[in-house]
Image: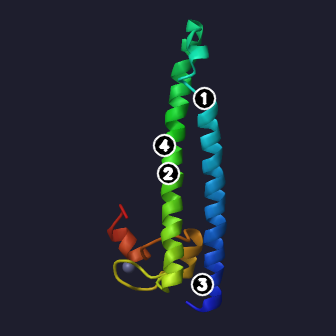
C-alpha cells in the first residue's frame, strides 16, 4: 500500500472514530437523563409502569454502547497499525487485505480468505 493510500485510510479511520465518539456521547447523555436512583421520582409509585420500558431501552442502549466502544477500540488498533506500517495486512496469513475490503470496513483485521475460515474474528 503506498503512502498516499495509507493516509486516506488513516483519515477515514479518524473520521470514523469521531463519528463513533459522537454516538457514544449521545448514548451517555441519554443514560444520564434516565436516572433511576433519583429519589424524587421513586416516591411516585404510578411511575413504576414506565420502568419496564425504560429498563428495556436502557439495556438496548447499553448493548449498543458496548458495540460502539468495541468499534472504537478496533479503530484505535487500526490507527496504531498505520503508525507501525502494518495497516492493511492480515493478522493471520500476513497477506495484504484488498483496498476494496478496507474501504468497506477500514478497521478490518483479516483478509477475506481468513475471515471466511474464522467467522468469529
Ligand atoms: Zn489472511
Structural distance between the alpha carbons of marks 3 and 1: 42 Å
Structural distance between the alpha carbons of marks 1 and 2: 20 Å
**Label 3 with label 1: CB-CB less than 8 Å:** no
> Which residue has dot 4 on it?
63
**Label 2 with label 4: CB-CB less than 8 Å:** yes
Q: Find out if the beta carbon at label 4 lies less than 8 Å from the nearest ligand 1 atom.
A: no
Q: Which mark is residue 34?
A: 1
Displayed quadrant of residue 30: top right
Structural distance between the alpha carbons of marks 3 and 2: 26 Å
* Camera-nearest label, 1 or 2: 1
**Label 4 with label 3: CB-CB less than 8 Å:** no
For marks 3 and 1, the one nearer the N-term is 3
For marks 4 and 1, the one nearer the N-term is 1
Structural distance between the alpha carbons of marks 4 and 1: 16 Å
> Which residue has dot 3 on it?
6
Other-residue count near label 1 (Cα within 10 Å), few / some / many at <14 / 14–19 / ≥20: few
The secondary element bearing badge 1 is classed as loop
Q: Is residue 94 left or right of residue 100?
A: left
Q: Which mark is residue 67?
A: 2
Amino acid at each position: 500500500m503506498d503512502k498516499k493510500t495509507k493516509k486516506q485510510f488513516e483519515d477515514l479511520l479518524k473520521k470514523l472514530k469521531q463519528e463513533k465518539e459522537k454516538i457514544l456521547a449521545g448514548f451517555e447523555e441519554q443514560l444520564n437523563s434516565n436516572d433511576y436512583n433519583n429519589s424524587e421520582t421513586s416516591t411516585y409509585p404510578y411511575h413504576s409502569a414506565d420502568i419496564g420500558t425504560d429498563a428495556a431501552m436502557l439495556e438496548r442502549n447499553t448493548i449498543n454502547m458496548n458495540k460502539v466502544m468495541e468499534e472504537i477500540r478496533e479503530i484505535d488498533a487500526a490507527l496504531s497499525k498505520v503508525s507501525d506500517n502494518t495497516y492493511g495486512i492480515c493478522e493471520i496469513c500476513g497477506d495484504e487485505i484488498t483496498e476494496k475490503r478496507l474501504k468497506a470496513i477500514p478497521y478490518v483485521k483479516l483478509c477475506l480468505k481468513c475471515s471466511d475460515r474464522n467467522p468469529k474474528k
